Image (spheres, helix red, strand yellow):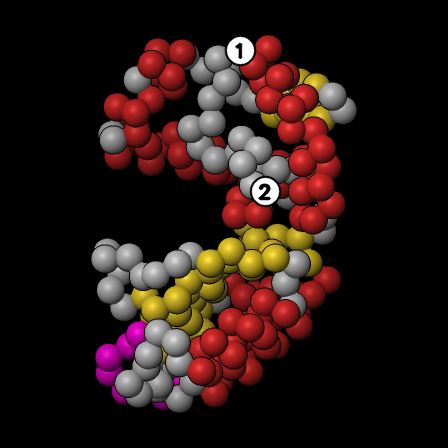
Amino acid sequence: ESTRFDGFDCWISRVDRSEYADRLAENMENLEWLAMIGVRHQRAVADLASKLEMLPARFGTVFLSEQSLKQHVASGKKNFQTVFKKIAGSDEWGIKVFRVAQPGRAAIVEAASGTDYLKSKAQSVMPRAKEEDPKLMELVQALSGLSVDTASGGKASSGQPSLVWHGSFLVRRSAQKKGASTLRKFTAEFSEGYRVECSGPWPPYSFVGQHG
């Protein structure tokens, strides 16, 4: 349901306090519960984001009363206005670059449009790839130049040892075809060693600050 505070429409779900506040930490460790509820949250946010500009709150954002939500909106009003201007007409796209051990030829991905290309996986490789390979950094800089903002994912996690770089780009919808062309150019130049994965469009979770 939607409620309005200080000129902002706030989309909320009314939930059981014991499940989503008192026992939230415990429930977050229940992978079956987390998967079911998390996917439901993501689908709701994505549906809203496809129809209007919004600042998405991550799953687990809980207000104990409408009054606490109202106070939160009032205190962050100026920041919300600034962020809305930044994300206007934009989507979040994710890029992951993996090191591939075996040699091979770069895979060419056929796509009907630039957006389709960004959704697909462009695969290629480069021998003895390093985390700060100049060509990889050149790709990151080129995509950054086409983006409103960027958010680095930091170092590869221990759970993904072949991940050498990952981050998110806030891209104007009008610039997505150019972004696809840039990505195509660089992945074609990666002869051996890398596999590049692209995902999106997503609501701009990584670019809305600490609003929720």
Which residue is pictured at 61% across the width and 57% down the height? 149
Mark 1 surroundings: few (<14), some (14-19) or many (≥20) residues within 10 A: few
Where residue 178 appears, as percent x and y from the top left, is 66, 72
Residue 135 higher or lower than 33, as above or below: below
Residue 148: horizontal and vertical position, in percent?
66, 58
Give the spatial CA distance, label 1 vs label 2. 23 Å
As displayed, is residue 79 above or below residue 72?
below
Residue bounds of the magenta highlight: 99-109
Name the foreground residue: 165 vs 108.
Answer: 165
The quarter of the image holding the N terminus is top right
Callout 2: 10 Å neighbours few (<14), some, many (20+)?
Answer: many
Position in image of residue 184 (x %, y %): 54, 78
Judge by depth and name the residue closer to the eye, 11 or 127.
127
Between 78 and 205, the residue placed more toward the observer is 78
Query: In this rendering, would 157 be left or right of 183?
Result: left
Labelled disc at residue 141: none
Please tell me whether the stretch drawn in magenta is mainly helix, strand or loop: loop
Q: Is residue 92 visible?
A: yes
- Which residue is rendered at x = 46% and y = 83% of the image? 135
For disc 1, the marked residue is 65
The vertical placement of 212 against 65, above or below, is below
